[in-house]
Image (spheres, grey):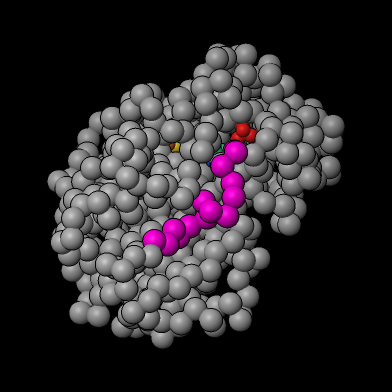
Amino acid sequence: CGVFGIWGHENPAQITYYGLHALQHRGQEGAGIITTDGRNLNGIKGEGLVNEVFDENKLKSLKGKAAIGHVRYATAGGGGVENVQPLLFRSTTGSLAVAHNGNIVNANHLKHHLERKGSIFQTTSDTEVLAHLMKQSGNGPMKERAKSALSILKGAFAYLVLTEDALFVALDPNGLRPLSIGQLGDAWVVASETCAFDIIGAEFVRSVEPGEFLIINDKGIQTDRYTPKAERAICALEYVYFSRPDSDIDGINIHSARKRLGKQLAKEVIVEADVVTGVPDSSISAAIGFSEESGIPYELGLIKNRYVGRTFIQPTQELRERGVKMKLSPVRSVVNGKRVVMVDDSIVRGTTSRRIVTMLKEAGAKEVHVVISSPPMKNPCFYGIDVSTDSELIASGNEIEEIRQLIGADSLTFLSEEGMKNAIGRPDDNETRGLCMACFTGNYPTEIYPDTVMPHEK
Ligand code: 5GP
Ligand code: SF4
Ligand code: MG
């Protein structure tokens, strides 16, 4: 998912619309914006893309001085407009709206507890738990209630909470998801990715710290903590796949990181080939890096139809297969009679690689060598990036040679874990270099609860 927030602007809904548009790649299932005018919260949300949910009149109807917005990442099963965020909770003692990127691993545990105390949940989303915890934690000031509620949550969360008179911003103790603060004139903005600042002309100020709690209101911005900082563990896949190439995370540009991943891969594999091609869009940077390092020319061997969305984010396998076919086409004159290196950023179920190898061979490629700019994904993600169940992960039950056969490639190479850490090149000096790599290594940075609801089970 992607979140965006702004405080202190005369057109907060319009700005949020542009911000969400830049974050569209983080979720295409639904979008929503909620504004405050200092007295009331008002919002519009719906299923679909940002430009399908909103039009000029709708944006104009959302008046106020601040807003939060959300784009929802589709996960199988749990659709429905009631799960589209921000979620709005009206109350005579203070209303609030919440937008969340991540996954709360103890949400089910907390839900049972809250239901015994009288909560009735509106949605099947883990996001809602925070609002109920805030409501049930007494009558103190909202910011104290928010801090105490946040301190009970486990997992991954970049949270925006909008009340009538303040915007709260919080990041989980490990900083699993990215979140940045910027300034647009006198207004404060916050977004999952810095590309949202560029589109609205805002200046990047800094990243939100793990465990940090920010209060933004008419008096300005104030920093606080709801919990001590834990070991930094930002999702490695944000660098590898998820974020936009023009975004920076903690000062590291995503495109440049991907190029280094590709270069590192070229150092780790020996392959004789005529052309290197990347799978658009997310693997182009890595393919350029691979070509630079190996000296094998980069070519546009695959074209993407830009009117098809991200195929991974489709609820069923059949839709995903059809999606890949509609989305990618080989450039016959580039690959015909050639030995082709195909760079992709990851193999999850193997759908994409299998289809593309077949496609390239049908277009006349003599050999197809698949190189992947991340290690084999063997474990499920509990933190809000939907990398399926164990059984769906092709690398969880198969050795590399078996995967090679299943996708029909002439050779298959994955990047090493060390190579990935070094290529991303975060400044952290702990064992994992500040990254979560749990889907590769199985070392989860947080506790995992037996009743953790996986994102795709919602
Ligand atoms: P597969 O087709 O093997 O199931 O998934 C791999 C393809 O989906 C790659 O081309 C990659 O760009 C994309 N992808 C890989 N990992 C993820 C992920 O965690 N989330 C999403 N949305 N897409 C992914
Ligand atoms: Fe990212 Fe993998 Fe960690 Fe999930 S398990 S947060 S996808 S690195
Ligand atoms: Mg891809």
Q: Position of residue 383 (x, y in %)?
A: 40, 38
Residue at (53% x, 30% y) in the render: 388
Residue 390 position, x and y percent, is: 51, 22
- Residue 191 drawn at (x, y percent): 40, 62
The answer to which of 124 and 277 lies nearer the viewer is: 124
Residue 85 among those drawn in magenta = yes
Q: Is residue 86 visible?
A: yes
Residue 253 in picture, x, y percent from top left:
42, 55
Is 34 colored magenta in this rendering? no
Q: Residue at x 66, y 65 (%)?
A: 52
Residue 350 lies in quadrant = top right
426 to the left or right of 71: left
Per the rendered image, the range of residues in magenta is 76-89
Q: Nearer the viewer, residue 402 or 447?
A: 447
Q: Quadrant of residue 447?
A: top left
- Residue 400 against residue 455 in the figure, above or below: above
**Residue drawn at 52 percent across, 72 percent down:** 18
